[in-house]
Image: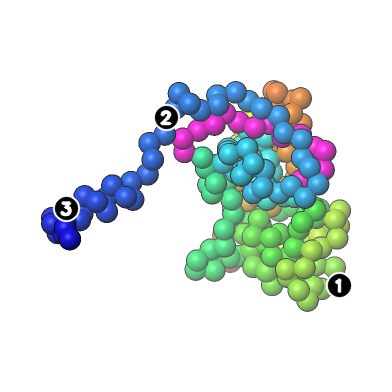
């Protein structure tokens, strides 16, 4: 029986856990086209084509990468990369639950989309679930239940508050990228552009949207109006 020296163990552990080297010359560098099949999700498409969720979302200028697809719609598939991005375009719940009770600067309504729940809408608007539930027509008992598509939901607003609004050509990226850069929320941008999901693949120049920016309260004391 042969025994290994203890001094060799760190090297062996390091070698066993080291990530495989990515050879960029072997990557597919072309832009492809994918037709959505029944039952497809962003995660399943990402796995199928071996591309990052956020890489796909940004090339298709998606409002939210997690909005369910429609069967038959077409997606641009980006070139392959050694570092696929599966997270930076996604909205995650805050660890400290630090949400507002109202939206700064508006708008006053949000049009519901396929796959929406009160919880996802609240996350997009960066406000509490209770705040959205309180203004939802008829009240909502289950924040995780799917809401009716194309419903106009009242949004609680902070008063006084303001947003600057301007036209913006979205060439590449997602609404989260815009919200982080310009000082608004994904939900506010969606509310200003209720018919937009992602850019049509034929529109290579990008989509023109209405962009709320620098949304803020005008003072320390605000009231909630709806």
Position of the N terminus by quadrant: bottom left
The residue located at (58%, 65%) in the rendering is 99
Q: Mark number for residue 138?
A: 1
Nearer the N terminus, badge 1 or badge 2?
2
Percent coordinates x, y for residue 67 in the rendering:
72, 50
* Range covered by the magenta-colored residues: 69-83
The residue located at (71%, 59%) in the rendering is 121
Residue 126 sits inside the magenta stretch = no
Q: Which residue is mark 3?
A: 8
The residue located at (66%, 56%) in the rendering is 124
Distance CA(mark 1)–CA(mark 2): 56 Å
Front label number (2 vs 3): 3
Percent coordinates x, y for residue 81 in the rendering:
50, 33
Residue sticking out furthest to the front: 1
Percent coordinates x, y for residue 168 in the rendering:
67, 32
Nearer the N terminus, badge 3 or badge 1?
3
Q: Which residue is mark 2?
A: 23
């Amino acid at each position: 029986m042969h025994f290994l020296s203890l001094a060799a163990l760190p090297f062996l552990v390091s070698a066993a856990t080291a990530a495989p080297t990515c050879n960029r010359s072997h990557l597919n560098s072309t832009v492809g086209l994918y037709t959505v099949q029944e039952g497809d999700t962003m995660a399943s498409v990402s796995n199928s084509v071996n591309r990052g969720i956020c890489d796909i979302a940004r090339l298709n200028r998606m409002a939210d990468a997690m909005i369910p697809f429609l069967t038959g719609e077409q997606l641009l598939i980006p070139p392959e990369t050694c570092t696929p991005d599966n997270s930076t375009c996604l909205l995650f719940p805050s660890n400290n639950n630090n949400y507002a009770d109202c939206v700064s600067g508006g708008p006053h309504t949000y049009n519901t989309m396929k796959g929406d729940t009160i919880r996802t809408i609240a996350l997009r608007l960066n406000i509490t679930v209770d705040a959205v539930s309180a203004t939802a027509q008829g009240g909502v008992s289950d924040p995780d239940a799917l809401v009716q598509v194309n419903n106009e939901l009242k949004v609680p607003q902070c008063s006084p508050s303001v947003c600057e609004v301007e036209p913006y050509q979205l060439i590449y990226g997602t609404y989260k990228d815009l919200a982080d850069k310009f000082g608004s929320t994904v939900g506010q941008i969606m509310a200003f552009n209720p018919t937009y999901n992602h850019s049509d693949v034929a529109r290579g120049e990008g989509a023109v949207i209405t962009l709320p920016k620098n949304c803020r309260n005008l003072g320390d004391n605000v009231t909630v109006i709806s």
